């Protein structure tokens, strides 16, 4: 998705991924959609030598840093893995970037850094606190980026705090293909729809929300991808301004929410899915889990003001595109 959006915006891209949660087939499909091969290098962000080779071979403007593990449960069971992969990996990447004077970074942060919000909608100045190791490591990386920006004002570091990304490419060719039980609600719903899972387990129907189920700010991955393009364009504009003037204005550390600003409950999402697909999803309520947050949605004003970006797509688009992806690819990228 992101490669397509960057390609359409005129950026040349190199994809670097260890394929721990992705596949060559996804890269093949992106190449097919954009009509030319995507330059792909299999490698790990913890491998400094491999990164150095790539940074020496290219003249990069910046890095969009998505690489990381993202399963909350796994982060509780294997905390050292999350320090190692998500934090040490980021430090290695930043060191190599510094060595090659590449100082523009867009980092995939998360709304999870807000923990249980004190008020809604959540803006970027809201208190940050996390209850699980996955979120805490996102926060650790944000702190690293903040320290880096203070230490050296030539860094331009945008942390995009995603709310709840869902959906798939409208072609139905690219979508989420979790290696294990899906971590996000939309994938879960659709895996029930295609019969891979029996039913949807809904954690709690006693939240102080419109229908008692949890409320989240779902954002279409197409909008999310455009948010990254807008962030890169912003960094590009800042770089051009600096070239044209005698003074250096660094972006420093800039956190920005990527959300729609609108909350949707779990039952509203299930109902939207029924409207789109004609397929009912069996579900069962169970107790809320410790630390589950009743309601979370973004203030999306900063992204609009600074980046000129706002989400365009609706819940029905998110359901339609995910349904198309799931229907066309019941086994994900496993085409054999
Ligand atoms: N999907 C969400 O709900 C969500 C929400 C907020 C933030 N994020 C963050 O956005 C980023 C992308 O998320 P996604 O949903 O596309 O997940 P994803 O698992 O599809 O993408 C992460 C990619 O990083 C790769 N990777 C992991 N560790 C690596 C390493 N050490 N070296 C190289 N590659 C490595 C994986 O193979 C995978 O392709 C992640 O950092 C995630 O934490 C995701």
Image (spheres, rainbow, N blue to C red):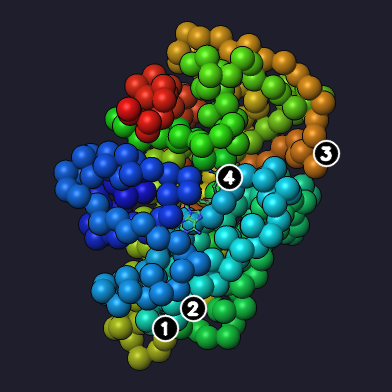
Residue 233 location in percent, x, y? 35, 62
| Dot 4 alpha-carbon crowd within 10 angstroms: few under 14, some 14 to 19, many 20 or more | many
Q: Which residue is mark 2?
A: 95
Q: Nearer the viewer, mark 1 or mark 4?
A: 1
User: Residue at (53%, 22%) from the top-left corner?
Assistant: 191
Q: Are marks 2 and 4 in contact (CB under 8 Å)?
A: no
Pointer 4 residue Cβ closer than 8 Å to ligand 1: yes
User: Residue at (42%, 83%) from the top-left corner?
Assistant: 99
Q: Which residue is mark 3?
A: 290
Q: Nearer the viewer, mark 1 or mark 3?
A: 1
Foreground residue among 98 and 256: 98
Mark 2 or mark 4, which has the lower sequence index? 2
Indicate left or right for 298 with 26 as reference: right
Q: Quadrant of the N terminus?
A: top left
Q: Nearer the viewer, mark 2 or mark 4?
A: 2
Query: Is 12 rendered above or below residue 334?
Result: below
């Amino acid at each position: 998705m992101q490669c397509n959006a960057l390609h359409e915006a005129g950026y040349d891209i190199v994809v670097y991924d260890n394929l721990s949660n992705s596949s060559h087939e996804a890269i093949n499909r992106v190449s097919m959609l954009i009509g030319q091969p995507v330059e792909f290098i299999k490698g790990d962000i913890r491998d400094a030598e491999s990164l150095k080779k790539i940074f020496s071979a290219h003249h990069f403007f910046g890095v969009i840093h998505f690489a990381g593990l993202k399963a909350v449960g796994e982060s509780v069971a294997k905390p050292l893995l999350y320090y190692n992969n998500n934090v040490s990996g980021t430090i290695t990447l930043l060191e190599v970037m510094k060595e090659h004077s590449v100082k523009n970074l867009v980092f995939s942060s998360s709304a999870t850094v807000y923990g249980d919000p004190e008020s809604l909608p959540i803006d970027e100045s809201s208190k940050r606190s996390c209850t699980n190791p996955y979120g805490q490591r996102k926060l650790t990386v944000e702190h690293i980026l903040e320290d880096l920006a203070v230490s050296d004002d030539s860094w331009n570091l945008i942390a995009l705090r995603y709310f709840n990304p869902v959906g798939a490419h409208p072609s139905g060719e690219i979508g989420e293909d979790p290696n294990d039980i899906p971590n996000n609600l939309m994938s879960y719903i659709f895996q029930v729809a295609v019969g891979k899972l029996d039913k949807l387990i809904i954690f709690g129907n006693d939240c102080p929300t419109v229908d008692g189920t949890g409320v989240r700010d779902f954002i279409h991955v197409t909008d999310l991808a455009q948010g990254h393009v807008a962030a890169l364009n912003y960094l590009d504009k800042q770089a051009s301004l600096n070239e044209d003037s005698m003074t250096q204005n660094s972006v420093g550390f800039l956190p920005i929410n990527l959300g729609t600003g609108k909350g949707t409950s779990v039952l509203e999402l299930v109902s939207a899915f029924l409207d789109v697909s004609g397929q009912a999803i069996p579900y069962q309520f169970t107790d809320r889990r410790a630390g589950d947050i009743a309601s979370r949605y973004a203030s999306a004003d900063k992204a609009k003001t600074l980046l000129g970006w706002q989400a365009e797509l609706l819940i029905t688009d998110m359901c339609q595109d995910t349904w198309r992806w799931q229907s066309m690819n019941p086994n994900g990228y496993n085409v054999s």
